[in-house]
Amino acid sequence: MRVFVTGATGFIGSAIVPELIQAGHQVLGLTRSETGAKSLKAAGAEPHRGSLEDLDSLRAGAAQTDGVIHCAFDHDFTDFVAVCEKDRRAIEALGDALAGSNRPLIITSGTGMGNSVPGEPASEDFFDRNHSNPRKISEITGESVAGRGVNVSVVRLPQVHDTRKQGLITYAVQIAREKKLSAYVGEGLNRWPAAHVLDVARLYRLALEKQQPGSRYNAVAEEGITMKAIAEILGKGLNVPVLSLSPEDAQTHFGWLGMFAAYDMPASSTLTQKRLDWHPAGPTLLADLEAMKYD
Ligand SMILES: NC(=O)c1ccc[n+]([C@@H]2O[C@H](COP(=O)([O-])OP(=O)(O)OC[C@H]3O[C@@H](n4cnc5c(N)ncnc54)[C@H](OP(=O)(O)O)[C@@H]3O)[C@@H](O)[C@H]2O)c1
């Protein structure tokens, strides 16, 4: 397939590109910059200049391919509602180009959207439309675009990691470094799921190739690692104290990350592993955090 990948220069996208190419697909990768275009060419992909703000560039990219993997996202967490709205417009534009064609559109969401019962792992087959996280708009838009005859699947991500980046934990590392304190909230028993970036890239490819309309996949290798375990590894790596904070103090300590720091969001991938024959091979989140260079 010739595949349009948005976010092709990002952490996850730059793992998806070689995964697709090695499997015999061709990649048209969205990029805003000359640097991005050069890195895409070096990876064997064809660059497509455009942006999330330029909806025609998204439509043009999708129109000339057999399917789309949408991974671009503006990670300005200080105005999260606005950037989620940007994702809504992007998914609608990609849908415009694919409507009625049966060409797959894989969109990206978070595993938290599938948590129904507190403390129970999120499942692929549940979607919380009333979730407090504004990112729910990505899946809501995916559903409305599917209603226009687009073959939409959702890949829900946990904390995606290697030894360089680990999703929201990367921001927790910055905060712990700045404040010389690695914190967790209360007993720190709330859990975040995780998966290695190469396992995640493989899952996107399998979802694309499966082309199962309306499917939702959890790219989860580990159901939940406690925030206390994560904070302890960061404290060791940064050589700073590890401390439990009250929910109020955690808000001040974590800033915008405070809205996620106390979330308990375990997630299962039992159905995903079965449906895609996907078997994550690691390494684990804590192994990558242990192996990371902290200086
Ligand atoms: N990493 C995780 O653990 C994690 C967890 C949950 C969900 N996700 C989601 O997974 C997806 C990929 O995440 P990531 O970690 O790979 O992100 P990332 O490393 O921050 O990369 C973001 C990508 O989006 C592109 N982008 C940003 N703003 C853009 C704009 N205005 N127009 C066009 N392209 C733009 C960037 O391109 P440039 O090179 O031009 O900047 C880059 O390719 C996102 O939807 C993210 O929210 C990630």
Image (cartoon, rainbow, N blue to C red):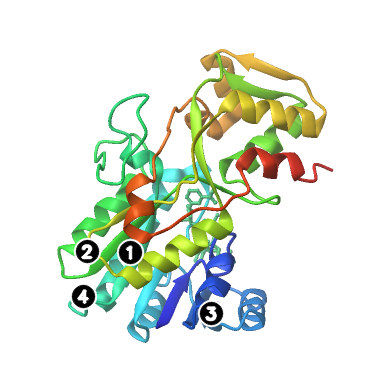
> Which residue is identified by label 4?
99
Task: First in sequence, mark 3 or 2: give its number.
Answer: 3
> Which residue is identified by label 3?
21
Task: First in sequence, mark 4 or 1: give its number.
Answer: 1
Image-quadrant location for residue 294: top right
Circle 3: is it few (<14), some (14-19), or many (20+) Cα within 10 Å? Answer: some
- x, y percentage for residue 112? 38, 39
Looking at the picture, does residue 62 appear above or below residue 176? below
Q: What residue type is labelled 3?
A: Ile
Looking at the picture, does residue 122 appear above or below residue 248? below
Q: What residue type is labelled 1?
A: Ile
Task: First in sequence, mark 1 or 3: give its number.
Answer: 3
Answer yes or no: do the residues labelled 4 and 2 have beta carbons within 8 Å?
yes
Question: What whole-number distance in Å separates the C-alpha atoms at marks 3 and 4?
Answer: 26 Å
For mark 4, give the secondary structure. loop
Q: Which residue is drawn at 46% across and 46% down?
A: 220
Question: What whole-number distance in Å separates the C-alpha atoms at marks 2 and 1?
Answer: 8 Å
Q: What residue type is labelled 2?
A: Val
Q: What residue type is labelled 4?
A: Ala
Q: Is mark 2 within 8 Å of ligand 1?
A: no
Q: Which residue is drawn at 57% across and 27% down?
A: 227
Disc number lying in front (3 or 2): 3
Question: What whole-number distance in Å separates the C-alpha atoms at marks 1 and 3?
Answer: 24 Å
Answer yes or no: do the residues labelled 2 and 1 have beta carbons within 8 Å?
yes
Disc number lying in front (3 or 4): 3
Q: Nearer the viewer, residue 217 or 275?
A: 275
Q: Residue at x 65, y 50 (%)?
A: 165
> Which residue is identified by label 1?
91
Task: First in sequence, mark 2 or 1: give its number.
Answer: 1
> Which residue is identified by label 2?
145
Question: What whole-number distance in Å separates the C-alpha atoms at marks 4 and 2?
Answer: 8 Å
